[in-house]
Amino acid sequence: MPKKVVLAYSGGLDTSIIIPWLKQTYGCEVIAMVGDVGQQEDLKSAKKKALATGASSATIEDLREEFLTEYIWPTLRAGAVYEHKYLLGTSMARPVIAKRQAEIALETGADAVAHGCTGKGNDQVRFELAYKAIAPKVKIIAPWREWTINSREDAIAYAKLHNVPIEQTKANIYSRDRNIWHLSHEGGVLEDPANEPDEAMWQWIASPEKAPNKPEVVEIGFEGGTPISVNGKKRSAVALLDELNKIAATHGVGRIDLVENRLVGIKSRGAYETPGGTLLVTAHRELETLCLDRETAHYSEMLSLRYAELVYYGAWFTPQREALDAYFTEAQKRVTGTVGLKLFKGNVTTTKRVSPYSLYRKGLASFAMTGYNPKDAEGFINLYALPVTIPEEAKVK
C-alpha cells in the first residue's frame, strides 16, 4: 500500500474527487502538483482547493517556458501534425507535466504517483510512459481504472457526496483541456459526429462570422526553424505565443473539428482551438518551401508523420523521438527568415516569404530561364525514362 502519492492536480472534476478517493482507498498522504502550462486558470485557487479537500501539501510548478522551448518548438520544427489536423496540444503538455510530477516524487520520497486520466483515453499512456522513463520504480495509481465511477455523471455525484466543489454540471458536461497552445473540448453533443458543435462551446477563438471586417497582417520571424519574433520584434517564447494567440483568436483563426484515431484503438471526436499555433505551423511550412531542398523536404514529410505519431502515442522520452530531433535540428538549420500572413474571418493567406537562405532563384524560375539551358532537358528525360522504355523495348524483341 502506498504511503505518499504525488497527484497531477488540475482542480477539475476528475482530479478534485481523486484526493478524497485516494485517502479513503489507500489511507495515504497526497501531495498535489499543479502544473502551469498556460491554462489561464486561477491556479492559486486550485492549490487552496487541493489543500481544502485533503492534500497534505500542494505546489504550483511554472512549466510554460519549458513546455514551449523543449516540447512545442521541437514538434513545430518537425512539422508534426496528427491526422492532418491535430496540432498535438494535449499530447505535448502531458509529458512535461508528468516529468515534473515524477521528479517531485523522487525529491519527496513518495512511493506512488497518480493521474486523473480515463481508462480509454490517450492521456493515461502519455502520463505513464513518462513516469516509467523518469521514475520507473514508483507505483502508478490510475483511479479511473480502479473505482466504480463509470461516467462524468457518476463523478459529479461522488463530488457532491464528499462535498467537493466542482464547476461541471449535467448541463455543462464538456471535458476541456487548456494550455498556452490550445483548448480542447470533448463530450456532450460532440459524442455524435453527426452533430455540429454548439457555438457556445467555443471559448477562445471568435466566430469567423463575427470577426473584424478588416484583415490584419502579421509577420513571424524564424531562426533555425524556431519562432523568434512577431512583426519584427523579438519575443520570449511565452510572450511570442501569447501575442499570436490574441491576434489569431480575434480573427477567428484556429478552430478545428476532428474525428481521430486514439492510440487505444477507438475513434473519438473532439473540437480544438489552436489560434497562435495555427499561425506558427502555417508560417513554418511556408518558410520551409523557400529554404529546404526537394529531397530534404520530402523526406522530412515522412519523418514528420512518425514524429506526430510518437508525440500522440506518448512516446516522448524515447530514443527514436530523440533521434528524430537530431535529424530535424540539422535539417532546419537554414529555415531562417520571415513569413507574412493575412488573417481575415477565419482564413489565413500568405503575403510574403523572405529568407537569407532562400533556394528560390528568380532567373531559374522565370519563363526567361536565365542560367538554364532547355536543351539539357532532353538528355535528362531520356535517362529518367529508361525504366519505362526498356521494358517496352523488350516486348518488341
Image (cartoon, rainbow, N blue to C red):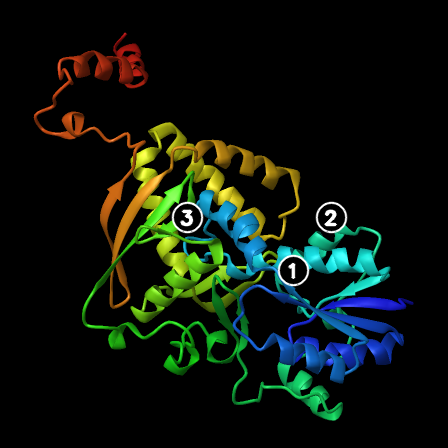
- The residue sitting at 66% across, 46% down in the picture is 317
Which circle's residue, 1 or 3, is located before the other in the chain?
Answer: 1
Q: Name the residue under label 3.
A: 227
Q: Residue furthest front?
A: 233
Above or below, 71 against 90 in this view is above
Q: Name the residue under label 2.
A: 133
For the N terminus, the quadrant is bottom right
- For the residue pair 297 and 189, the one nearer the viewer reads as 297
- The residue sitting at 59% across, 41% down in the picture is 321
Above or below, 158 against 326 in this view is below
Q: How many marks?
A: 3
State the CA–CA distance, disc 2 to disc 1: 13 Å
Q: Which of marks 2 and 1 is in front?
A: 1
- Is residue 303 in sight in this rendering? yes
104 with respect to 65 (left or right): right
- The residue sitting at 37% across, 80% down in the picture is 199
SS at mark 3?
Answer: strand
Name which residue type carries label 3.
Answer: Pro
Q: Residue furthest left?
A: 368
Q: Where is residue 375 in the image (x, y as percent from the top left)?
A: 13, 13
Q: Name the residue under label 1.
A: 97
SS at mark 2?
Answer: helix
State the CA–CA distance, disc 1 to disc 3: 23 Å
Which circle's residue, 2 or 3, is located before the other in the chain?
Answer: 2
Which circle's residue, 2 or 1, is located before the other in the chain?
Answer: 1
What is the quadrant of residue 241 in the picture? bottom left
Q: Residues within 10 Å of mark 3 (few under 14, many from 20)?
A: many
Q: Nearer the viewer, mark 1 or mark 3?
A: 3
Name which residue type carries label 1.
Answer: Ile
Q: Position of residue 187 (x, y in %)?
A: 53, 76
- The residue sitting at 45% across, 51% down in the picture is 81
Name which residue type carries label 2.
Answer: Ala
